[in-house]
Image (cartoon, rainbow, N blue to C red):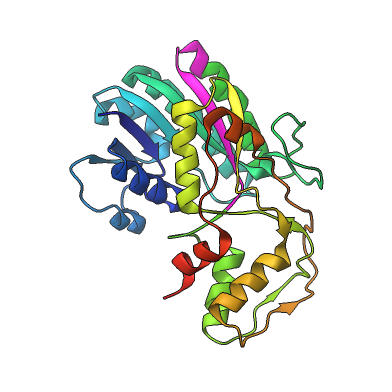
């Protein structure tokens, strides 16, 4: 049985990935922050080992994980995207993780990056374009990409990087647009948002988990991949589809000025070509799975 170490295992993406891996017969070493209420999401399972270890202490990982892992997926990251100190700390702990994986004995590292690495652009976002991050979060992720690739290869660890775009699904943060819309619509209130003219892409968490699985199995060593659906259309098209499914008699208030009204146009050609993965959950089905009570 293959062993996968997952950091941030009780978080939004982490929980969905762990659930997917257990269903597909992997043994999971789940690294979680000690004392977090989110840890209750991870139910007891014979193929799940909970590792209560904060990322600030990740250098001690070899004391908790005594068997080599075939794959490691790094999801843990401070969510305070504009906090420079927090992002620097996440970058530092990420490098500590790679060092610890070298001691534990890990064959392949999958780092999870973000659309924020690209910065503000209306161009199609493909992996070959020059990235221009505009937030501490995006910049820290770019730095992590380069430094972890270099160090992983020095330690003899295969390295792959996945840039995640907008994901929704079970346990998503309440601060996301779709989560907010669903709460407002179900309560009969009028949600307020931008004009929704910017292009967007939404990927269900089940598909995101399957993409990460495909990348640590089949992604090419040293390569970067976008993780997105590929269904790119105006944001308003998504929100109206959700409205009709959840509360057709409630209207959405469009027109609030966007802080950053840039579009998001990810290319998914590379991940499809290299791994065979493609999204399976269409937006309507994803909304029904996630937001209908």
Is 11 in the magenta?
A: no
- Give the tally of numbered discs: 0
Front position in the image: 240 or 92: 240
Residue 48 visible = yes
Q: Residue 74 placed where, x, y %?
A: 46, 36
**Residue 213, image quadrant:** top left
Q: Which residues are magenta?
A: 152-166
**Residue 106, image quadrant:** top left
The residue lying at 24 percent from left, 25 percent from top is: 66
Location of residue 35 with respect to 111 vertically, above or below: below
The residue lying at 69 percent from left, 32 percent from top is: 127
Q: Residue furthest left?
A: 46
Q: Residue 164 placed where, x, y %?
A: 58, 44
**Residue 91, image quadrant:** top right
The residue lying at 52 percent from left, 17 percent from top is: 151
Location of residue 241 with respect to 17 vertically, above or below: below
């Amino acid at each position: 049985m293959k062993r996968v170490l997952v950091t941030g295992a009780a978080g939004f993406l982490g929980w969905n990935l762990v659930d997917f891996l257990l269903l597909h017969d992997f043994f999971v070493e789940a690294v979680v922050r000690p004392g977090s209420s989110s840890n209750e999401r991870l139910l007891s399972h014979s193929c799940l080992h909970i590792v209560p270890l904060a990322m600030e202490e990740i250098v001690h990982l070899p004391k908790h994980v005594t068997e080599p892992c075939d794959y490691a997926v790094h999801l843990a990251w401070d969510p305070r995207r504009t906090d420079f100190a927090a992002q620097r700390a996440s970058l530092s702990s990420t490098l500590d993780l790679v060092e610890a994986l070298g001691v534990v004995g890990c064959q392949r590292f999958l780092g999870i990056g973000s659309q924020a690495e690209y910065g503000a652009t209306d161009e199609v976002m493909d992996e070959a374009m020059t990235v221009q991050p505009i937030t501490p979060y995006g910049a820290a992720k770019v730095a992590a990409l380069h430094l972890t690739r270099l160090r992983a290869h020095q330690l003899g660890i295969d390295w792959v990087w996945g840039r995640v775009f907008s994901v929704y699904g079970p346990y998503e943060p309440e601060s996301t647009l779709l989560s907010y819309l669903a709460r407002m619509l179900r309560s009969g209130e009028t949600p307020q948002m931008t004009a929704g003219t910017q292009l967007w892409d939404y990927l269900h968490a089940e598909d995101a988990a399957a993409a990460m699985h495909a990348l640590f199995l089949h992604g090419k060593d040293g390569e970067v991949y976008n993780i997105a659906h590929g269904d790119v259309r105006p944001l308003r098209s998504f929100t109206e589809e959700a409205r009709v499914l959840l509360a057709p008699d409630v209207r959405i208030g469009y027109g609030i000025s966007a802080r950053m009204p840039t579009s998001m146009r990810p290319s998914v050609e590379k991940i499809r070509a290299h791994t065979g993965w493609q999204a399976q959950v269409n937006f309507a089905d994803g909304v029904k799975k996630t937001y209908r009570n």
